[in-house]
Amino acid sequence: MITRRELAAGAAGIALVTAGTREAAAQDRTGVTDNVLKIGVLGSLTGVQAVFGQGNLSGVQIVFDEVNAAGGIHGRRLEIASVDDESTPARSIAGFRRLVDDERVFAVIGPSASAIGQAMEPTLRAASAVPVLISIFSSPAATEPYKNNVFRTGPLNDRLQGKALADFALDVLHGQKVALAQQTDEYGRRGGQSLTEQMRARSKPLVATEVFNLTDTDFTAQLLRMKQAEPDVIVIYGFPAPAATITRQARQLGLTAKIIGSNATSNRTYPATVGPAAVGVMNVITLADLPERPTDPRMQAYVQKFTARFPDLARQNRPDLGDCLGYNGAMVFAEGLRKAGRDLSREGFIRAMESISNFETGVGLPTTFGPNRREGNLQARVLEFQPDLTRKLIEQRLQAQP
């Protein structure tokens, strides 16, 4: 006969087992085995945004190869499942689902372009259990509204960068009549809108705003209208090819304003593309050092690793911005895995990422996350093109307020 005390004890035991089962079930260990951790890498390896996707993947490959050569992280080798989204949002969404549903990866690093990241916002929001690391693109859509699973390293997002650029134009460049040329896609719209709002908030509205398409090659009409406003500072929020042509044509048309370009324009070949008109032009850059003239031993070491691993790309004046940002992001990701410990779960990894504070790789700018912070970087450096068309970092920085 079972006594009341035995029945109570049995019920308590069942409750403990049930609670333990629920706790174990709550710890999502998808992609984790005793010896292997499977990570998805999503990016534009072909198409118009290929340089950024290649940078995303190359950074992961260098870091993961190095980690695996040293025995992995907590005894687990890092395995890559890579998908090329071909620079199209539809293929990126399908690629993300393939990585999560079919490849069963633990986390996803990517995508790599702002227009694609913006289109993927509902997908990232729906996949709330899957850790996602953004290391290349700057669209605020990835993290705004807040998503517990999405972390950004490296780039200063376009809302924050637009505000910081407005402050820089007023406080450092002492602009009195600031004009804006912005690309018509997600990248240019977000940054341009933020800069415009900040200028108004500081009672210094823009004297001119002109728009352009990524594929445009003649900006005469926009620049002639801008010239009538007599700007002393021009901000170009767009990609390198159109921004370079705008800069060159602006000088040909007699605009003498100080020109500063957003982060996307800070590639190594930009001054050569612009030509002599580049002298004195500034660009925002979210790197700690310049890969072509490194002063930090950590950047020097990275450049050597990249050159050895990807000699064909190195002959194309790389590593460049996207490559450096991809490497920096992969380093932060690996640090999160180390902090998460051997008993690894997706939830535990997210908590570990939140504990990263002022983490420096010598390549990207310091990274800090927190329980309610998913933007790892809140600053940017500024470079200026010299008479010999080399790039030089200046002392002043852009500082964003979240």
Image: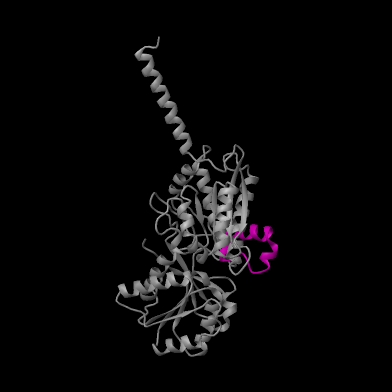
Q: Please say if 337 is above or below 378.
A: above
Across and down, in percent, residue 383 comes to 50, 71
Q: Residue furthest top?
A: 1
Across and down, in percent, residue 290 comes to 55, 66
Q: Is residue 299 magenta?
A: yes
Front residue of 38 and 301? 38
Across and down, in percent, residue 258 comes to 44, 81
Main secondary structure found in the magenta portion? helix
Across and down, in percent, residue 318 comes to 63, 66
Instruction: Tell me the quarter of the picture where residue 92 sits.
Output: bottom right
Res 41 visible: yes
Q: Is residue 31 magenta?
A: no
Res 297 visible: no
- Which residue is found at the position 39% from the left and 75% from the top? 169
Image: magenta residue range: 296-323
State how the image is colored. Answer: one colour
Q: Residue furthest front?
A: 1
Instruction: Tell me the quarter of the picture where residue 176 sits.
Output: bottom left
Front residue of 396 and 324? 324
In the rendered image, which quarter contains the N terminus?
Answer: top left
- Which residue is found at the position 42% from the left and 61% from the top? 378
Front residue of 319 and 131? 131
Instruction: State how many labels appear.
Output: 0
In the rendered image, which quarter contains the C terminus?
Answer: bottom left
